[in-house]
Image (cartoon, rainbow, N blue to C red):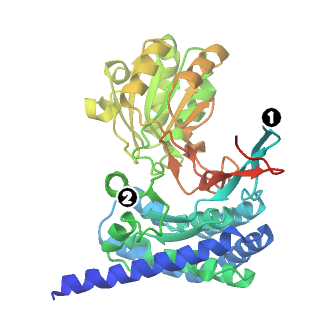
C-alpha cells in the first residue's frame, strides 16, 4: 500500500472517531441544563483571559508562517489576534452565556377541536461541522453557539491558524470540564491534512447533521458542491451602499467610509457605492474624495471618474467582485429602479444599505432588495451576529431555507411537535 493510501486511511479513522464521539456527546448536550452550558462558557471566557499570553504566542507563530508564505494583508488581518480582540472573544462567550436557552422553547401551541393540544418546541440540530479559514476567533464563536443550542461541534480550522485555534480550543475544553459536560462536545480536528475536509463533507458516517463553511469563495463553493449534508453558507459578500435622493451628506459620508474601510476583509464590507443622480452634484465628489483620502482605490463609471482624476475605470467584472480589500466600485444611477436593478444583477444577497431621509423610498428598498440583511441609514458592517445581540455568529447564510442572515443560537436549532392528549384516537 502506498504512503498516500495509508495517510487517507489514517485520516478517515481519525474523522470517523471524532464523529462517533460527537454524536455521543450531542445526546448528553441535548439534555444538559442551561446552568451547566452557561457555566462552561463563562469558565472558557475566564480561561481565555488567563491564557492570553499563550494564545498570542501561538498566534504569532501562525502569523510568521503566513508572512513567510507571502499572503495578502487582508488575510493577515483576519488571522491576527490581539489583546483587545481576545477580550472581545471572552466577552462574546459571556454574552452567549447570558442569552436565553433556545432548547425546549415552545414556539407555538394550539388546541384542536378534539381537545388534542399540539406544541412546536425547539430542539438541537445534533452535530454541527464548521470548516473555516484564517479566523481563529471562529473557534470560540462556533463552539459557544453550538454548545448553547445543545449541539456538539466538530471544528476544522485553517492550516494557517492551526496553533491559534488549538490554543482557543483548549480554553473551551477547560470550560466543558469545569462544568461537568462531555469534553467531546467541542472537538477540533487534530490534523492539518486537507483530506479531513472531504471526510466532513461526506457526513462522517451519518454523524454530521449540518456543515457551516467560513472562508473564501473557493472553500464555500467546494462545500456547497460536495457536501452530502445540509449547508449554511454564503458564497460572496458583494454588498452595496446606495446613497439615494434625500440623503443627508454628513450621514452618507460617515456610513460609506465605515462600510468600506472599517475592516475591508470582512464579509460585511461594502464593495460597491451607488449614488443617485439627483444628489450626485453635491454628494458624489465628497464621498469619492473621502474614500481616496482613506487609502481606498475607487473604480468608477464615467460620472465618477469625472469628479477626481485618481478614479480608474470600472470593468464589468468589478460590479460583481467581492474585493475584501481597500477597493470599491462606484457608479451613478438614475433613481431607485436603477439601483434595485443593479443590486439584483450583481449582488450576492448578503447585505445592502440605503442612505436617505425619505421614509417611503427606504421602505421600498427594504421590501424589494432580496438580501439576508437590508439596512436603512446604517453601515453594512453591522452584518455581524454580535451586533445583532446574538453574542456571536457561526456564519452568515444567504440561502432561503431555515437559517438566513447571522446564524446564532436560534438558527442552530430545529423543532419537533409534541402532542398532549386525553385518550384521543383517530376515527
Q: Which residue is mark 2?
A: 228
- The disc label shown at residue 260, or none: none
Q: Which residue is mark 1?
A: 113
- Is residue 310 something one can see in this rendering? no
Residue at 72% in and 56% down:
102
Q: Quadrant of the C terminus?
A: top right
Residue at 39% in and 28% down:
330
Give coordinates of residue 232: x percent, y percent.
48, 51
Residue at 41% in and 20% down:
341
Residue at 33% in and 63% down:
71
Give the secondary structure at mark 2: loop
Q: Nearer the viewer, mark 1 or mark 2?
A: 1
Q: How many marks?
A: 2
* 233 sits left or right of 115 in the view: left
Q: Residues within 10 Å of mark 1 (few under 14, many from 20)?
A: few
Residue 189 or 34: which is nearer the viewer?
A: 34
Q: Identify the image quadrant of residue 152.
A: bottom right
Give coordinates of residue 282: x percent, y percent.
52, 16
Residue 221 or 119: which is nearer the viewer?
A: 119
Residue 207 or 4: which is nearer the viewer?
A: 207
* 408 sits left or right of 368 in the view: right
Mark nearer the N terminus (1 vs 2): 1
Outermost left residue = 2
The span from disc 1 to disc 2 (Cα, nearest Å) is 41 Å
Amino acid at each position: 500500500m502506498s504512503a498516500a493510501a495509508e495517510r487517507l486511511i489514517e485520516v478517515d479513522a481519525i474523522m470517523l472517531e471524532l464523529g462517533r464521539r460527537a454524536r455521543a456527546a450531542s445526546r448528553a448536550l441535548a439534555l444538559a441544563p442551561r446552568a451547566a452550558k452557561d457555566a462552561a462558557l463563562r469558565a472558557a471566557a475566564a480561561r481565555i483571559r488567563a491564557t492570553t499570553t499563550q494564545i498570542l504566542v501561538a498566534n504569532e507563530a501562525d502569523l510568521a508562517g503566513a508572512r513567510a508564505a507571502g499572503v495578502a494583508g487582508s488575510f493577515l488581518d483576519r488571522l491576527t489576534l490581539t489583546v483587545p480582540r481576545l477580550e472581545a472573544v471572552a466577552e462574546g462567550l459571556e454574552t452567549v452565556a447570558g442569552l436565553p436557552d433556545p432548547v425546549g422553547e415552545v414556539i407555538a401551541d394550539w388546541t384542536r377541536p378534539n381537545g388534542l393540544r399540539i406544541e412546536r418546541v425547539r430542539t438541537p440540530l445534533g452535530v454541527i461541522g464548521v470548516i473555516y479559514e484564517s479566523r481563529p476567533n471562529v473557534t470560540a464563536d462556533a463552539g459557544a453557539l453550538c454548545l448553547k443550542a445543545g449541539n456538539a461541534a466538530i471544528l476544522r480550522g485553517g492550516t494557517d491558524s492551526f496553533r491559534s485555534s488549538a490554543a482557543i480550543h483548549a480554553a473551551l475544553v477547560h470550560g466543558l470540564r469545569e462544568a461537568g459536560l462531555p469534553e467531546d462536545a467541542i472537538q477540533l480536528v487534530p490534523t492539518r491534512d486537507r483530506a479531513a475536509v472531504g471526510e466532513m463533507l461526506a457526513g462522517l458516517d451519518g454523524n454530521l447533521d449540518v456543515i457551516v463553511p467560513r472562508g473564501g469563495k473557493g472553500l464555500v463553493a467546494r462545500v456547497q458542491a460536495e457536501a452530502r449534508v445540509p449547508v449554511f453558507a454564503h458564497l460572496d459578500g458583494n454588498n452595496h451602499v446606495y446613497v439615494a435622493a434625500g440623503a443627508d451628506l454628513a450621514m452618507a459620508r460617515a456610513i460609506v467610509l465605515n462600510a468600506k474601510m472599517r475592516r475591508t476583509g470582512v464579509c460585511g464590507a461594502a464593495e460597491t457605492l451607488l449614488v443617485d443622480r439627483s444628489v450626485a452634484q453635491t454628494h458624489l465628489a465628497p464621498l469619492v474624495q473621502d474614500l481616496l483620502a482613506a487609502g481606498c482605490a475607487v473604480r468608477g463609471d464615467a460620472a465618477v471618474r469625472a469628479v477626481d482624476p485618481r478614479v480608474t475605470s470600472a470593468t464589468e467584472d468589478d460590479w460583481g467582485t467581492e474585493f475584501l480589500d481597500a477597493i470599491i466600485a462606484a457608479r451613478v444611477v438614475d433613481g431607485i429602479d436603477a439601483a434595485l436593478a443593479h443590486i439584483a444583477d450583481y449582488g450576492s444577497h448578503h447585505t445592502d444599505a440605503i442612505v436617505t431621509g425619505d421614509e417611503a423610498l427606504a421602505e421600498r428598498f427594504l421590501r424589494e432588495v432580496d438580501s439576508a440583511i437590508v439596512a436603512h441609514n446604517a453601515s453594512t458592517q453591522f452584518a455581524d451576529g454580535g451586533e445583532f445581540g446574538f453574542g456571536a455568529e457561526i456564519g452568515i447564510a444567504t440561502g432561503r431555507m431555515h437559517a438566513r442572515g447571522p446564524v446564532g443560537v436560534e438558527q442552530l436549532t430545529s423543532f419537533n411537535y409534541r402532542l398532549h392528549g386525553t385518550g384521543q384516537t383517530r376515527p
